[in-house]
Amino acid sequence: MESQQQSGIGSGLNEGDTVVVSGLFLIDSEANITGALERMRHPEKTESSMPAMSDQPVNMHSGH
């Protein structure tokens, strides 16, 4: 049963069971933290996967 922002559970739970009401934020945050930790552990992977920057100035208006 669902009404506006509330849902009723008819079966499958026992008194005292933990119920997650919103896990999206936690999942997204944990993925970001895991990625950041991995980049800190292996910075050479991050640097080598980025394209090298040229020492030449960029003409933003070329081709116009």
Image (spheres, helix red, strand yellow):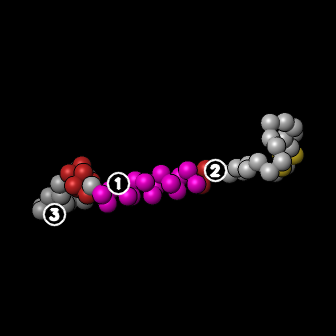
Q: Nearer the viewer, residue 63 or 37?
A: 37
Judging from the image, what secondary structure is the residue with disc 1 in? Answer: helix
Q: In the picture shown, does residue 29 fall above or below 12?
A: below
Give the residue at x 22% y 55%. Answer: 44
* Magenta extent: 26-41
Query: Residue 12: horizontal and vertical position, in percent?
Result: 80, 36
The mark nearer the N terminus, 1 or 3, is: 1
Specify the amino acid type for callout 2: Gly
Give the residue at x 35% y 54%. Answer: 38
User: In the rendered view, does 7 fall on the left or right side of 23?
Assistant: right
The residue that mark 1 highlights is 38
Question: Image quadrant for the N terminus?
Answer: top right
Specify the amino acid type for callout 3: Pro
Q: Is residue 24 magenta?
A: no
Residue 10 has which mark?
Answer: none
Q: Using a 10 Å C-alpha cutoff, classify the residue at mark 3 as few (fewer than 14 neighbours), some (14 to 19) or many (20 or more).
A: few
Query: Residue 46: horizontal and vertical position, in percent?
Result: 27, 54
User: In the rendered view, does 28 fall on the left or right side of 36?
Assistant: right
Which of the 4 image quarters holds residue 41?
A: bottom left
Judging from the image, what secondary structure is the residue with disc 3 in? Answer: loop
Judging from the image, what secondary structure is the residue with disc 2 in? Answer: loop
Q: In the picture shown, does residue 54 fall above or below 10?
A: below
Residue 23 has which mark?
Answer: 2
| Comparing labels 3 and 2, the label whose residue is closer to the camera | 2
The residue that mark 3 highlights is 57
The mark nearer the N terminus, 1 or 2, is: 2
Give the residue at x 14% y 58%. Answer: 54
Residue 61 seen in render: no
Q: Nearer the viewer, residue 5 or 18?
A: 18
Specify the amino acid type for callout 1: Glu
| Comparing labels 1 and 3, the label whose residue is closer to the camera | 1
User: In the rendered view, does 31 fall on the left or right side of 63?
Assistant: right
